[in-house]
Image (cartoon, rainbow, N blue to C red):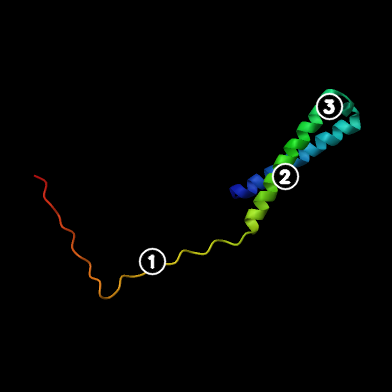
């Protein structure tokens, strides 16, 4: 499995867990306290962050691949390669 697929699945799991915990807090009535409201706010912000990351990942995956680089132009027929002068160390 590629790293992108693993990160995608991990992001989906984090979003589902965060939204599930928000729903559980609302159902149990614990969201009526300040701590519950803060926990809901944190869960929603984490879900938002991972959701934005997943949107960026999907957009990037849908982009066409970059064009392959063009091969370097060959030297003209009239140009000759000159030998490199070598010096001896004394």
Question: Which dot marks residue 51?
Answer: 2
Q: Residues within 10 Å of mark 1 (few under 14, many from 20)?
A: few
CA separation, marks 1 and 2? Answer: 43 Å
Query: In the rendering, at what x and y percent does residue 87 appear?
Result: 13, 52
Q: Residues within 10 Å of mark 3 (few under 14, many from 20)?
A: some
Disc 1 designates what residue? 72
Looking at marks 3 and 2 on the same chain, the residue that comes earlier in the sequence is marked by: 3
Query: In the rendering, at what x and y percent does residue 70 appear?
Result: 44, 67
Disc 3 designates what residue? 36
36 on left or right of 62: right
Farthest residue to the bottom: give it. Answer: 77
Q: Secondary structure at mark 3?
A: helix
Q: Secondary structure at mark 1?
A: loop
Q: Are marks 3 and 2 in contact (CB under 8 Å)?
A: no
CA separation, marks 3 and 2? Answer: 22 Å
Looking at marks 1 and 2 on the same chain, the residue that comes earlier in the sequence is marked by: 2
Q: Are marks 1 and 2 in contact (CB under 8 Å)?
A: no
55 on left or right of 31: left
Looking at marks 1 and 3 on the same chain, the residue that comes earlier in the sequence is marked by: 3
Q: Residues within 10 Å of mark 2 (few under 14, many from 20)?
A: some
CA separation, marks 1 and 3? Answer: 63 Å
Residue at horizontal 91 percent and vertical 28 percent from the top: 29
Query: In the rendering, at what x and y percent does residue 24 appear?
Result: 86, 33
Q: Secondary structure at mark 2?
A: helix
63 on left or right of 78: right
Residue at horizontal 65 percent and vertical 50 percent from the top: 57
53 w.r.t. 37: above or below: below
45 w.r.t. 81: above or below: above
44 on left or right of 2: right
């Amino acid at each position: 499995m590629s790293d992108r697929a693993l990160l995608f699945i991990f992001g989906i799991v984090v979003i589902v867990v965060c939204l599930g915990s928000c729903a559980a807090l609302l159902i149990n009535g614990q969201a009526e306290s300040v701590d519950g409201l803060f926990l809901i706010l944190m869960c929603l912000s984490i879900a938002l962050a991972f959701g934005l990351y997943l949107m960026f990942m999907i957009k990037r995956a849908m982009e066409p691949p970059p064009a392959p680089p063009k091969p370097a132009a060959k030297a003209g027929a009239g140009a000759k390669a000159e030998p490199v002068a070598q010096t001896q160390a004394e």
